[in-house]
Image: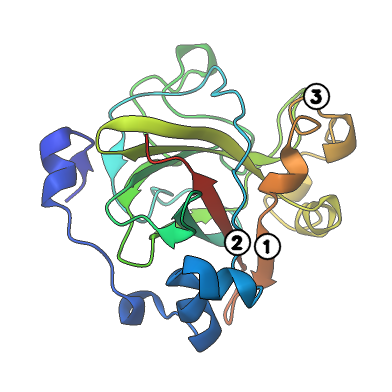
């Protein structure tokens, strides 16, 4: 059963294990962080750019891995690592929130979009010992005036330490949007290069994407943050 994000519910959450989320050998080594991982090139210890929270943030999201609520779209797994930018080591127990538009470009929880009270495409996970939070979602749809993105917020010890947005290569989005249900809405208006928010640090917030062994994609990123 889903839980709402509260201090007590976060404390009750058990961390994921490396075996449970299928870390490969090199990824597991990178997740351990520290100077050796930096010198080997596995970890880039860079402060992740802050970006606007936007108008669609809703506090108290559900603690859950699958945020789709059965809505259609190309499957997307998000693997979000949180690193202490001062030490390059993973932060265990950080609460990672994500929220995004569905395949039709619509956010839940918005009266202006007639989705007040709905919670699709929103969720929270707590990072494991490798600093990893995993979400099952769908490739986001587009809406007027913005390039394709996922919002993210990171809490450590009850404090918000990062608010940002995650982005996708335009070439991949073009390919995805030729498929259903995205093809029903042709003519997206904004690409990365002409998105004002993307131009302010978006290249440092691009997801590394690869095809899933089944259908869809896996998007990964390492987010360097200050612990307080």
**What residue did someone put label 3 on?**
196
Report the disc number at residue 80.
none
- Would residue 16 appear left or right of 73 to someone viewing this image? left
Report the disc number at residue 208.
1
Alpha carbon distance from label 2 to label 3: 23 Å
- Whether pointer 1 and pointer 3 mark residues with C-beta atoms closer than 8 Å, the reply is no
Which of marks 3 and 1 precedes in the sequence? 3
Q: Which residue is drawn at 58% across and 82% down?
A: 213
Bin the neighbour count of mark 3 within 10 Å (Cα to Cα): few under 14, some 14-19, many 20 and up: some
Q: Tell me if residue 42 can be seen.
A: no
Q: Please tell me how many numbered marks the rendered image carries.
A: 3
Which quadrant of the figure contains the C terminus? top left
- Can you give x and y, in whole percent of width and height, for residue 150 in the image? 58, 41
Q: Is mark 2 on a helix, strand or loop?
A: strand
Q: Which residue is drawn at 39% across and 23% down?
A: 58
Viewer-side residue, 214 vs 204: 204
Alpha carbon distance from label 1 to label 3: 21 Å
- Would residue 2 appear left or right of 89 to someone viewing this image? left
Q: Tell me if residue 153 can be seen.
A: yes
- Can you give x and y, in whole percent of width and height, for residue 138 in the image? 55, 53
**What residue did someone put label 2 on?**
219
Q: Residue at x 53, y 75 (%)?
A: 36
Image height of 91 relative to 119, above or below: below
Which of marks 1 and 2 precedes in the sequence? 1
Q: What element carries label 1?
A: strand
Q: Residue at x 37, y 55 (%)?
A: 66
Chosen colour scheme:
rainbow
Image height of 173 relative to 101, above or below: below
- Whether pointer 2 and pointer 1 mark residues with C-beta atoms closer than 8 Å, the reply is yes
- Can you give x and y, in whole percent of width and height, for residue 193 in the image? 89, 36
- Whether pointer 2 and pointer 3 mark residues with C-beta atoms closer than 8 Å, the reply is no
Which of marks 3 and 2 precedes in the sequence? 3
């Amino acid at each position: 059963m889903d839980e709402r994000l509260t201090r007590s519910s976060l404390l009750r959450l058990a961390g994921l294990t490396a075996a449970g989320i299928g870390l490969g050998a090199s990824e597991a080594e990178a997740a351990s962080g520290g100077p050796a991982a930096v010198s080997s090139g596995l970890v880039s210890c860079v402060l992740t750019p802050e970006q606007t929270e936007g108008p669609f943030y809703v506090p108290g999201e559900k603690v859950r891995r699958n945020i789709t609520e059965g809505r259609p779209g190309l499957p997307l797994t998000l693997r979000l690592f949180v690193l202490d930018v001062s030490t390059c080591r993973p932060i265990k127990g950080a609460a990672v929130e994500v929220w995004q538009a569905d395949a039709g470009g619509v956010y839940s929880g918005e009266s202006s979009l007639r989705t007040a009270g709905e919670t699709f495409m929103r969720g929270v996970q707590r990072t494991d010992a490798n600093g990893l939070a995993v979400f099952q979602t769908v490739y986001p749809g587009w809406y007027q005036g913005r390039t394709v993105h996922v919002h993210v917020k990171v809490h450590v010890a009850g404090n918000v330490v990062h608010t940002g947005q995650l982005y996708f290569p335009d070439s991949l989005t073009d390919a995805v949007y030729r498929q259903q249900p995205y093809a029903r809405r042709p003519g997206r208006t904004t690409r990365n290069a002409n998105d004002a928010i993307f131009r302010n640090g978006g290249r440092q917030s691009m997801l590394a994407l690869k095809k899933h062994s089944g259908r869809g994609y896996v998007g990964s990123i390492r987010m360097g943050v200050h612990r307080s």
